[in-house]
Image: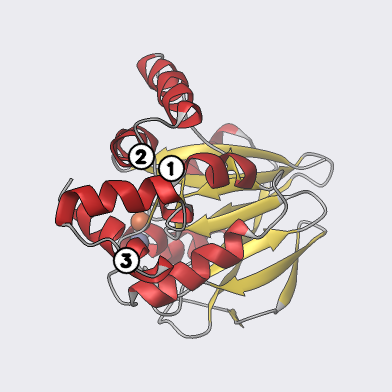
Amino acid sequence: MIKIDALPAFSDNYIWLLQDPEQRRCAVVDPGDAAPVEAWLTANPGWQLSDILITHHHFDHVGGIEQLKASSGARVLGPANEKIPRRDLALGESDRVTVLGHDFQVIEVPGHTLGHIAYHQADQHWLFCGDTLFAGGCGRLFEGTPQQMHASLSRLAALPEQTQVYCTHEYTLSNLRFATTVEPLNTQIAQRLEQVSQWRAAGQISLPSSIGLERATNPFLRSAQAAVSTTLAARDGIKERSNIEAFAALRAWKDSF
Ligand code: ZN
Ligand code: FE
């Protein structure tokens, strides 16, 4: 049985820590900083860090690789199409990799960056999606086009609804505030905002999310909804637009929200 915990890093990053208590082995996803991981390993003597999974090249996701690789010798897995320090295994679309005895499939999700990948474990319903799909939101378009990001998010949204979404940032509250502005009449969004507000006020993490919950409450997966078109049209007067145009308009709006 694998246990998954979040190690907080920087101001709002999470480094996901997968633990196999029987083998006393663990893996981390996107260690932007080595310190929280090394602190955990120090507090849990006898554990071996076996794998470092990387979703994309941004510093807050790769900054801890060098130090962790040097101290543990862990295997570094990362996207083939990006420059990742100390990478041992270069991964692309549909590649399969075994981590802690579990089979993960790689999904290419360009948009936030061009080489961004996600790791999906279909039996356990885990998705490690970096800065692509967030709880209630999505990553900024630093390198890709709205079309690419829309296609990437559509692929993730098509995963089974019980899939647990392990994204890398605690942005949920601000994302849901935006979501209520986009869909003021959506009661599931309102309820989720209320719930996450309580969690955050109590110092609790808002993750993981699930694909089912994201489909119901994440405006970036809902650009085809009539309620979203209505809100966008009220803002700029444009009544006809494609799903991708609606997605692009939402993303641009959120950038300055
Ligand atoms: Zn990033
Ligand atoms: Fe990030």
Q: Nearer the viewer, residue 121 or 111?
A: 111
Q: Give the number of the mark in front: 2 or 1.
A: 2
Q: Of the numbered discs in the image, which one, if any, rests on residue 223?
A: none
CA gap between label 3 and label 1 equals 25 Å
Q: Quadrant of the C terminus?
A: top left
- Check the image and report above or below for 93 versus 139: below
At x 40%, y 82%, the residue is 83
At x 37%, y 38%, the residue is 183
Q: Count the marks: how many?
A: 3
Per the image, the residue denoted by label 3 is 240
> Looking at the rendering, which quadrant does residue 173 occupy?
top left
Per the image, the residue denoted by label 1 is 136
Q: Nearer the viewer, residue 187 or 147?
A: 187
Crowding at mark 1 (Cα within 10 Å: few <14, some 14-19, many 20+): many
Q: Which SS class for mark 3? A: loop
The kind of residue on which mark 1 rests is Gly
Crowding at mark 2 (Cα within 10 Å: few <14, some 14-19, many 20+): many
